[in-house]
Image (cartoon, rainbow, N blue to C red):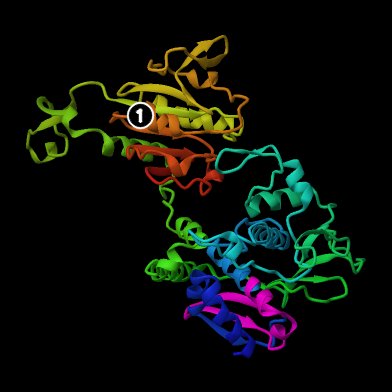
Amino acid sequence: MHAKWDTVLSELWVKSRFTSYFYQSVHFEEDETVPTLSLVTTTAGFVLRYHDTFPDAFSPDELTGLLAHEMMHVMLNHNHRIIPGKDILLQNLAQDMVINSYILENKDRFFSRAGRDLRDEPEVILPDGLPLVPDRFYTENSSRYDPSGRYDPSGRYDPSWEEVYEWLEANQDEKITEVTDKSQNSLNIDTRFEMPDFSFKEKASDDEIIPDFFNDTDGVIFKNASGSMLPAGVHFFREKALDDTMDALKKRIISFSERDENSRAERLYQDISSLISRIRPAKIKNFNKVVKRFLNQVLCGDDWDLSARRFNRRYFDEGIYAPGRFYKRQPALTVAVDVSGSMLVKPKNIERAFGVIESLLGRYAVHLICIDEAVFVPEKKDDTFIATDKPNGEYLYRKGDWRYIKTAGNAATFFGPLFDTFMKDKKEPLIVITDGEVYDMDRLTPYRHTLWALPPECVGRIKPPFGRIVAID
């Protein structure tokens, strides 16, 4: 192993205990076929492959920043074939932009620990020239609220790489004018690097950052038109069969790190461990079956009784006439619909979701409530629902009422009033229909009889600390 890595790994133990634990599980391997470096998953574990001359060109702090960058690709599960049929090169560029921008925006907090002054924390430094999320992306998406619910006029929230990819795909003439620059200690408006022409014409200037296939189809590398490689990692395409191996390795690192008090105090450990251990979405694609199974499991047993008037069909074929189970009173459930301005659920998904809800009406009483910045019981007015002035009232859903559901002007969704007040002391099942843009998720009072129903494209954005998730599919 190159001697410079010894220095980097030794200093890393002091800077970030969690990152150090991660790289203690990584095998470092010189590989002259790799022009820069790359963190790959193998059946034997994680391997950092690097060219033997690459570490000489950078300071230990810059190499530490690159190690943090490569670790984030793994921890965020950036599978480079995640959107089939889309531009693979552009997807990889978006992934790099998002990680570089995240590290730069949080350079003084990336390795921070609880109880320590930020002024005492080591900054994360990246080499010059790495692409960042274009400034115009933030400008066009500035009407956002940050995860705590506060309005952020700068719009510099942490976007997903999918959001950046969609924006890049729609703005293929956009120039990359934002790159990392240590001398500026911040964003640098630098015209040396520009967004490539994604038609990949042969004629290109030396100014352009060009993502290109490495060794034909092995992966993606970033370079300029003259052929010089950027100090960015090679993105090798991972075999799908290695997904389980990678997940097991990440969980083992989390498990080992949580035993160390210094590691547990790190912001990075807390964010990543929460990401990895989040509740998985339901794998059953039939939304109808998931809802009915959920209701059968959470209804209170005290409300059921047995009667010989209704025989148990399970034993009927064997000639046994056993009493059957029936509900002593009509069971009720609550359906909460996100009607905030950020709600992205398409009308067809709303119709599909309530088609399943309406199939339950003969057996269940369905109470409808709406949520934006507050929770309210709706009432009909003309062709829409408005908030009633009875905060403790009820609205009994009837077939076709979904047509009156319209999104409101408020951009934020806060579920605190729903779980902390409205559902307090209730036992009935709760189905929440939302797109996952929830700003107070980490402060909710747990209500375990909860089913979060999301559009398929939004599954993965929401990380509830309780309940189950299902795609409206």
| Image position of 71 with respect to 101: above or below | below
Q: Residue at x 62, y 63 (%)?
A: 80
Q: Nearer the viewer, residue 306 or 54?
A: 54
Q: Which residues are magenta?
A: 36-65
Relative height, residue 17 to residue 425 (above, below): below
Q: Provide residue 404's location: percent of width, then percent of height.
A: 54, 18
The x, y position of residue 145, in whole percent, is 62, 39
Residue found at x 72% / y 88%? 53
The residue that appears at 43% across and 39% down in the rendered structure is 452
Q: Name the residue that disc number 1 marks.
A: 423
94 left or right, relative to 377: right
Please indicate whether residue 131 sits to the left or right of residue 191 in the image: left
Query: Can residue 471 be seen in this snapshot?
Result: no
Outermost residue, top direction? 382
Disc 1 packing (10 Å; few <14; some 14–19; many ≥20): some
Asked which quadrant contains residue 369, the reply is: top left
Residue 214 in sight: yes
Q: Is residue 405 left or right of residue 184?
A: left
Residue at position x 70%, y 79% in the image:
59
Query: In this orientation, which residue lies closer to the viewer: 444 or 432?
Result: 444
**How far from the left and from the top, in percent, is residue 189?**
84, 57
Could you tell me which secondary element the residue under label 1 belongs to? loop
Above or below: residue 63 compared with residue 380: below
Q: Quadrant of residue 175?
A: bottom right
- Tell me if residue 422 comes above or below residue 466 in the rendering: above
Amino acid type, callout 1 = Met
- 333 drawn magenta: no
Q: Residue 429 appears at what percent x and percent y? A: 33, 32
Marker count (numbered):
1
Q: Is residue 61 magenta?
A: yes
Depth check: 462 or 296 in front?
Answer: 462
- Location of the N terminus by quadrant is bottom right
